[in-house]
Image: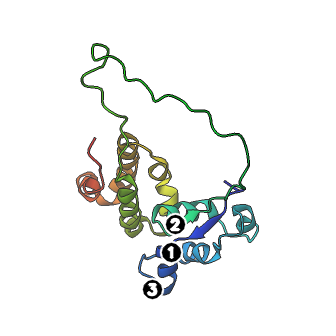
């Protein structure tokens, strides 16, 4: 990801002015440094430790987003017309075929989890929540929460740790 470029979202710009997300000083510094033109490698050159964890936190909170490079228009032949896909006959369809376990509200839960976990782990939250930030399905998200729950149980106790994370779990 060292070649990626990030820019502040509208929420990120508002966070700089209002300071409502409770960011650690180092994460706030990274938010300020993100300018939409410097690559991650240029930000790393400035010497901020754990830059990737701060970027992951800012992404999860929706305060920054990747800059999408605009492709230069290429003049080419018109695209070939492809016929629409043909559905299999009714006799070959599986009646209970479910779509993949993609959870549309996973990003919302991820943001909520990062804020909630920040109360317990402070500036180490991005390190503790790496698996949570990488989760793409509800099952992966819950597995990541299981790992975090075991860390919380060390000082909260097993039952209290489970209660703390219950609201953050997506339905599987």
- Answer whether labels 3 and 1 touch (C-beta < 8 Å): no
Question: How far separated are the C-alphas under marks 2 and 3?
Answer: 15 Å
Q: Residue furthest top?
A: 91
Residue placed under numbered mark 2 in the picture: 58
* Nearer to the camera, 132 or 31: 31
* Nearer to the camera, 103 or 129: 103
Secondary structure of residue under mark 3: helix
Residue 13 x %, y %: 52, 79
Residue placed under numbered mark 3 in the picture: 18
Question: How far separated are the C-alphas under marks 3 and 1?
Answer: 10 Å
Q: Quadrant of residue 109?
A: bottom left
* Nearer to the camera, 10 or 165: 10
Residue at image position (34%, 54%) is: 105
Q: Which mark is residue 66?
A: none
Question: How far separated are the C-alphas under marks 1 and 2?
Answer: 8 Å
Q: Specify whether 3 is left or right of 166.
A: right
Residue at image position (70%, 40%) is: 77
Residue 90 x %, y %: 28, 17
Q: Nearer the viewer, mark 1 or mark 2?
A: 1
Residue placed under numbered mark 1 in the picture: 12
Q: Please, is residue 58 above or below residue 172 in the view? A: below
Q: Quadrant of residue 111?
A: bottom left
């Amino acid at each position: 990801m060292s070649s990626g470029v990030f820019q502040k979202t509208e929420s990120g710009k508002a966070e700089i002015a209002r300071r409502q997300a409770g960011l650690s000083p180092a994460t706030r510094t990274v938010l300020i440094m993100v300018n939409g033109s410097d690559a991650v490698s240029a930000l790393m050159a400035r010497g901020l430790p754990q830059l990737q964890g701060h970027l992951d936190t800012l992404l999860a909170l929706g305060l920054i987003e990747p800059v999408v490079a605009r492709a230069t228009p290429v003049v080419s032949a018109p695209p070939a017309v492809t016929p629409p896909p043909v559905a299999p006959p009714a006799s070959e369809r599986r009646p209970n075929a479910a779509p993949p376990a993609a959870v549309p509200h996973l990003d919302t839960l991820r943001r909520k989890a990062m804020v909630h976990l920040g109360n317990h782990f402070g500036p180490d939250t991005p390190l503790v929540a790496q698996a949570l930030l990488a989760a793409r399905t509800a099952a992966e998200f819950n597995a990541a929460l299981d790992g975090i729950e075991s860390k919380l149980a060390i000082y909260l106790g097993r039952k209290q740790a489970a209660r703390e994370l219950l609201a953050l779990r997506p339905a599987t």
